[in-house]
Image (cartoon, helix red, strand yellow):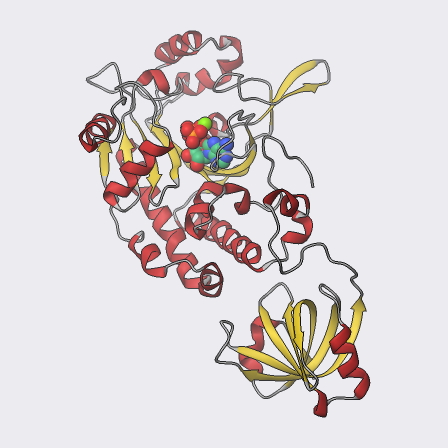
């Protein structure tokens, strides 16, 4: 008899197997007990028929408590009524770890209560499905950039300076110096691109976001590719192919999980069709004005969540909004060749209300211009000497972008809140557990 995982049930129909499981729920009558089981690979049902098992086993099955861990021995059958498609007819149960008064019961709980029990809540079905999809997005990310000839180059997490100003930075001490937790690895990736051509980083970033939104975490993971000898147009093509690749791989490898979440596969399928529409910031402003829904919208301001939602819904697909006003973008973006009020950049807005998932730009190659912008932004020029060196020694056109992993996962899974897209979310009022 083999010990298997639930997910492998399809290969063991009518065979006797052993599986290590936890009990998630149970229902029983005088003659039969239905045990809802999980093992971290899938969820399915165990059936214990009184007339087929010993008296002790049936009694044990009826007394099992939620989240008890155990080995079950039995025969796999097809179960066409369930989403998973298989069940196990149990002959024997061996309890491994008992569980009394598991706090998360099948009844409804408030969000705060569930977040306080995140370490247990992760066992639940929706959370399982989201984490599996997160894992797939990470896997497909490495695969995509590897196929495209990128190398992963890790950026530091402790930094001595502040790439985009200090307001959202976490301060810490570095022996007798000041240090900050990274809020982006980009500047380091630019050094990487000049050294190795096409690079990407994938690591945690930290932003002391004071606003409480469904889209902002305090600690989140970012994928930041940077490409030498590349203008913005080519970067946009990589971005859309990357997103389509993620969507396609989630469709191909996470069908069971999408089913648990009730995510419409046809909607996702549409997001694999390229190219994504591209509009300028100016055109976006016009669209918002024409809609009549945004009477106060003004050229020069950044978009909030309602504006981003409107724009992406208008196209029913992810949309690139290009060339934002210089004044609302970071210092390193390349200025437009014929206009001095906008920069060569684009944000990718996801539909269905999820907003910006990528921010990217072509980078300025002009050391004098950059120096000027650094000073203008109130940053300390000495901190950026190394960055300016990248322009002094063999500078080339280069572009890059940053994808917020959890933003993207929230969108792909159709969850309401970004806290669901990371195992242990750090939020404005939460650093436990
Ligand atoms: P927003 O305007 O939504 O705050 P941003 O302009 O600050 O975004 P960037 O600095 O361009 O974002 O960061 C790149 C990407 O990182 C964003 O497109 C988004 O996907 C993600 N991101 C930014 N801030 C957060 C956050 N607080 N939590 C989760 N993801 C984030
Ligand atoms: Mg922000």
User: Quadrant where the C terminus lies?
Assistant: top right
- Compared to 85, does 145 lie above or below? above
x and y, in percent, of residue 61 in the image: 74, 77
Quarter, ligand 1: top left
Residue depicted at 27% across the width and 53% down the height: 273
Q: Nearer the viewer, residue 139 or 114?
A: 114
Q: In this orientation, does residue 139 appear?
A: yes
Left/right placement of residue 68 relative to residue 349 reads right
Residue depicted at 45% across the width and 41% down the height: 407
Q: In this orientation, does residue 227 appear?
A: no
Q: Nearer the viewer, residue 427 or 151?
A: 427
x and y, in percent, of residue 315 in the image: 24, 43
x and y, in percent, of residue 326 in the image: 32, 17
Q: Count how many numbered circles sit on residues in the image.
A: 0
User: Quadrant where the N terminus lies?
Assistant: bottom right
Q: Residue furthest bottom?
A: 51
Q: Nearer the viewer, residue 135 or 71?
A: 71
Left/right placement of residue 65 relative to residue 325 reads right
Q: Nearer the viewer, residue 103 or 257?
A: 103
Residue depicted at 39% across the width and 11% down the height: 373
- Compared to 4, does 255 lie above or below? above
x and y, in percent, of residue 22 in the image: 69, 67
Left/right placement of residue 90 relative to residue 364 reads right
């Amino acid at each position: 008899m083999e010990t298997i995982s639930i997910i492998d049930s399809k290969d063991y129909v009518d065979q006797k197997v052993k599986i290590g499981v936890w009990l998630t729920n149970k229902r029983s009558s005088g003659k039969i007990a239905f045990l809802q089981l999980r093992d971290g690979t899938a969820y399915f049902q165990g059936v214990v028929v009184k007339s087929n098992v010993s008296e002790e086993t049936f009694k044990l099955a009826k007394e099992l408590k939620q989240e008890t861990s155990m080995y079950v021995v039995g025969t796999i059958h097809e179960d066409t009524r369930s989403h998973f498609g298989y069940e196990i007819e149990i002959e024997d149960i061996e309890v491994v770890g008992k569980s009394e008064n598991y706090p998360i019961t099948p009844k409804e709980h408030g969000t705060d209560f569930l977040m306080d029990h995140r370490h247990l809540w992760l066992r639940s079905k929706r959370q399982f499905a989201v984490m599996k999809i997160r894992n797939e997005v990470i896997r497909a990310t490495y695969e995509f950039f590897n196929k495209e000839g990128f190398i992963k180059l890790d950026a530091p997490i402790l930094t001595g300076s502040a790439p985009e100003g200090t307001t959202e930075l976490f301060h810490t001490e570095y022996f007798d110096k000041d240090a900050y937790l990274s809020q982006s690895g980009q500047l380091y990736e630019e050094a990487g691109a000049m050294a190795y051509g096409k690079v990407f980083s994938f690591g945690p970033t930290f932003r002391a976001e004071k606003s409480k939104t469904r889209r902002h975490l305090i600690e989140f993971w970012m994928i930041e590719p940077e490409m030498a000898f590349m203008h913005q147009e080519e970067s946009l093509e990589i971005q859309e192919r990357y997103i389509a690749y993620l969507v396609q791989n989630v469709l191909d490898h996470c069908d069971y999980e999408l089913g648990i979440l009730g995510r419409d596969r046809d909607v996702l399928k549409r997001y694999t069709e390229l190219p994504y529409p591209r509009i300028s910031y100016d055109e976006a402003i016009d669209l918002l004005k024409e809609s009549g829904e945004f009477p106060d919208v003004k050229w020069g301001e950044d978009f909030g969540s309602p504006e981003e939602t409107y724009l992406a819904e208008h196209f029913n697909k992810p949309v690139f909004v290009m060339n934002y006003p210089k004044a609302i973008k970071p210092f390193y973006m390349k200025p437009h060749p014929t206009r001095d009020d906008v920069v060569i950049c684009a944000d990718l807005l996801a539909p269905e209300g999820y907003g910006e998932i990528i921010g990217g730009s072509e980078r300025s190659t002009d050391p004098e211009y950059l120096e000027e912008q650094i000073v203008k932004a109130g940053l300390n020029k000495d901190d950026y000497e190394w960055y300016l060196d990248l322009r002094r020694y063999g500078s080339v056109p280069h572009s890059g972008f940053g994808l917020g992993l959890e933003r993207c996962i929230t969108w792909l899974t159709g969850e309401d809140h970004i806290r669901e897209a990371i195992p242990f979310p750090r939020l404005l009022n939460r650093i436990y557990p």
